[in-house]
Each structure stands twice: as C-alpha cells, then as structure tokens.
Image (tube, grey):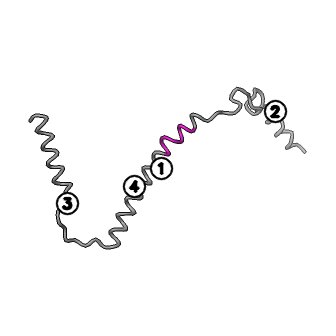
Amino acid sequence: MRRRDFFVLAAASSAFFIVPGTSFAYVGPGTGLSAIGTILALIAAVGLALVGFVWYPLKRLFRKKPGAGAISPSSAPGAGEESAQNAASSRKP
C-alpha cells in the first residue's frame, strides 16, 4: 500500500469515528458530573505531574546554596569527639 493511500484511508476512518451520528440516549446529571469530574481530575493530574517533574528540579537547580564553601562546625574534623566528651562529662554527677 502506498503512503498516500494509507493517509487517505486513515483520514476517512478518522472522519467516520469523529463525526457523531444521531443518538437518542439520555445522559443524566450523575453521568455528566462524573464526566466533568474525570476531565478536571485528569487536567489536575497532568498539571501536578508537570510541576513535580519539571518545576521543582529546575527550582532546585537554579537555587543558590548559601555558604557552599564554608565548613559548618558540626562537619569540622574532631567535632564528633568534642560532642562525645561533652555528653560523657554531663552524665557524671
């Protein structure tokens, strides 16, 4: 099948399924509200997924880290030894 024939067949079949026919069906208020709720939930889920997967990593990437070159007192060499000695001396009466 040639490429042109494939596109003509795809367009014709798409038009057949897209164009609605006459339907004598009743859609009650519960069904309509369920459909609206489902659509709103889908939009919210896609929006939150974009925020979670795109916005927060970009925000973390562009955020400056304060004092990235400085050594904090708790991470300095020997800081753990001092705190251990202070804890041991505080237990003695």
Q: Earlier in the sequence, mark 1 or mark 3?
A: 3
- Does 1 lie within the magenta span? no
At numbered mark 1, what does the secondary structure look like: helix, strand or loop?
helix
Contact check, label 4 and label 3, Cβ < 8 Å: no
Residue type for callout 3:
Pro
Displayed quadrant of residue 37: bottom left
Give coordinates of residue 91: x percent, y percent. 85, 44
Q: Any mark on residue 42, and which?
A: 4
Q: Nearer the viewer, residue 21 or 52?
A: 21
Q: Which residue is mark 1?
A: 48
Identify residue for label 3.
Answer: 20
Q: Which mark sits nearer the N-terminus, 4 or 3?
A: 3
Circle 2 is placed at which residue position?
A: 82
Q: Say few, some or many: other residues with alpha carbon within 10 Å of mark 2 (under 14 / 14 to 19 / 20 or more).
A: few
Instruction: State the extent of the magenta-drawn residues as a range.
Output: 51-59
Q: Nearer the viewer, mark 2 or mark 4?
A: 4
Q: Position of residue 45 (x, y in %)?
A: 43, 52
Q: Residue at x 86, y 42 (%)?
A: 90
Is label 4 in a helix, a strand or a loop? helix
